[in-house]
Amino acid sequence: MINTVKRTAHLAQLTLNPVWLALTAALALPMTTLHAEEHSHTLDIDNVPVTGNPLGVASDDMVVPVSVLGGRELSLRRQGTLGETLNGIPGVTATQFGPNASRPIIRGLDGERVRIMQNGVGILDAGSLSFDHAVAIDPLIIEQIDVVRGPAALLYGGSAVGGVVNAIDHRIPKESLNGATGRAEARFGGPDNTRNGAAVIDVGNGTFAIHADIYTRETSNLDIPGYAVSKRKALADGSARTNNGKLANSSANADGAALGAAWTFDTGYLGISYANMNNNYGVVAEENVRIDMDQQRWELAGEVRELRGPLQKLKLRLAHTDYQHVELEDGEVGTTFKNRGMEGSLEATHVPWAGVNGVVGYQFQNTRFQALGEEAFVPNVVTQTQALYVYEELPIDKHKITFGGRLGETSVNSTADDKFTQAFNNRFNPNSFALGGLYTIDDAWSATANLSHNERAPSYFELYANGEHVATGQFEVGSVNLDKEVSNGIDAQLKWKANGHSVTFGGYVTRFQNFIGLFDSGATDPVSGLPIANFQAVPALFKGLELDGKFALNDEWTLKLRGDYVHAKDTRNNEYLPRISPWRVGGGLDYRLGNWNARVDVLRAFKQNDVAENELKTDGYTNLSALLAYKLPVKYHVELFAKANNLLNDEIREHASFLKDISPAGSRSVLIGARADF
């Protein structure tokens, strides 16, 4: 295994054995608070889902559906990838290209239609280009994740037509801190024999605050229940059923660290942070290929409140990212991908005008993408975007109306070289609009609805791809003649909340005038022998249902229910679109008594028979998991836990995964861990 740890020695001593670091982080951190307790306090940052609403209202007052994971719940839910951490939230699945590369899919939409952000600014990596490229965010250091299910293009651009995932790490302190606060985690076991640990600390004197974090992760090849290749694939094309019990080339080694600082004052803050992450992992589709990733990210953020005049608040966010990964074939560099650029936004909250509250903002992004090597199937590209947006709310007693718009400009320009002999320049003006409302029926019941018109500029690979893409097993061909992707949608929810119980039931319909997808042409590339797939625009219709409920049976027992359904078709020929998740229903029972907490959870995914042409059906599965946790009876918060996954040892193959027929999820396993915070 190639070890990338040495490259971050300048930032932190990450060459420590990961097991030793994990034990030290989980057990030593709470002990250090013994010396600081008298002069410190815990920094309490509320989990406010501002991602779906720049005015920062609570989730119950949101017009669009937002799920928030934070604190202990996020800690116990963490997985090795962002996609798997969120998989199972109503409406959210994952691409699951093996255990090391998995992006969130929201309502059947993924790639360029799901906007992945860090602290409100988009990440720059190569994750949307190919499913074997991991997202450049490690869940170990994330403090909160907001998930907007449904169109959020109004605030975040056309790449948010499917939804938004915003990972918040608090690397730039935003609140005054006098003393020290922190957390640590360590965990061992699971189907991939994970050994990981993370430690986070913030210190401050009331005016200045400093943040530091460090993490390390190491996994072995994934244990699987049976063969990697499914029976359906073996019968369909004669593939040999090998790798019984183990998923070859699925190990990983990752680490990272960050340092941030901020000046905090009564009416705002100004801060900066630097983070470095490394990730070396196997590509399960090719047993001799590994990806070695490195990212460096600078962030600048500031906010000023209680201004005089027409503006109440100004918020600035900037991020500069330098991303690179190399694909190693038998240890030799094959293809290199680089993405470097800056993204930022300036947002102003105005004083109420005729009872209307809202914000106006400017957002920009400038990136330079490079692909170098024999398997580079896209040219070098410079992408520039900028947009003006406005979001407004009009309260009417206990109800409210929301409305807004976004005017954007995007240019995508490729350069010519020995492989791509012609340069292209494309320019688009994607504009989006939305109108929504919340109607409070009584103290327990409310209803929301949101109408949206969304436009997305085609991405560089949809325009310019022309080559062999080994990860998908296709020869991909883009089209420089693609126009903006245009969609119209409606989203509605009915909410009930009373006496510790809550239920949210929602439905949505999104009609695409020209859905840009990758479709098999029926032809074969004569050189590579791969099937040729073209990016083209077709009319499409997405619709679905979502359910999320919680019932407090008594002081000790809580029942949770959830479910989702997605139906997606190419309306040009009434054919199903590929990789759409089937019906899923689930529930959990949570028990708390004193320092003990136990829960059991079950998720049933039904068989997917509604498949695209040349797509195999997928059998259903039942994933039964359990958790046992115990808070130590000490002065500081220290919790030990054990998680059992896939207790039925079912063969779990996610239909949304490109590799569902050669890469199942892990087998029955137990993971133990410790978490501490002060």
Image (spheres, rainbow, N blue to C red):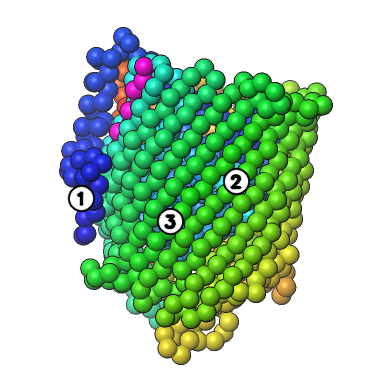
Q: Is residue 100 left or right of residue 8?
A: right
Give percent across and percent down for residue 62.
Answer: 67, 35
Q: Are marks 1 and 3 in contact (CB under 8 Å)?
A: no
Given the current orientation, which residue lies at the most extreme top position? 38
**Residue 271 occupies which quadrant of the picture?**
top left
Question: Circle 3: is it few (<14), some (14-19), or many (20+) Cα within 10 Å?
Answer: many
Give percent across and percent down for residue 142.
Answer: 41, 38
Residue 363's mark? 2
Q: Amino acid at mark 2?
A: Gln
Give percent across and percent down for residue 522.
Answer: 57, 84
Identify the secondary structure beneath mark 1. Answer: helix
Identify the secondary structure beneath mark 2. Answer: strand
Task: State which quarter of the image contains the C terminus.
Answer: top left
* Nearer mark to the viewer, of 1 and 2: 2
Q: CA distance from mark 3 to mark 2?
A: 17 Å
Q: Amino acid at mark 3?
A: Arg
* Nearer mark to the viewer, of 1 and 3: 3
Is 486 drawn above or below residue 604 in the view shown? below
Q: CA distance from mark 1 to mark 2?
A: 36 Å
Q: Can the viewer see residue 672?
A: no
Question: Circle 1: is it few (<14), some (14-19), or many (20+) Cα within 10 Å?
Answer: few
* Mark 1 or mark 2, earlier in chain: 1
> Who's the residue at 49% across and 39% down the image?
119
Q: CA distance from mark 1 to mark 3?
A: 22 Å
> Who's the residue at 41% across and 76% down the image?
234
Residue 340's mark? 3
- Can residue 353 be found in the magenta stretch? no
> Who's the residue at 71% across and 38% down the image?
391
User: Which residue position holds label 1?
Assistant: 6
Give the magenta part as a residue range. Answer: 198-205
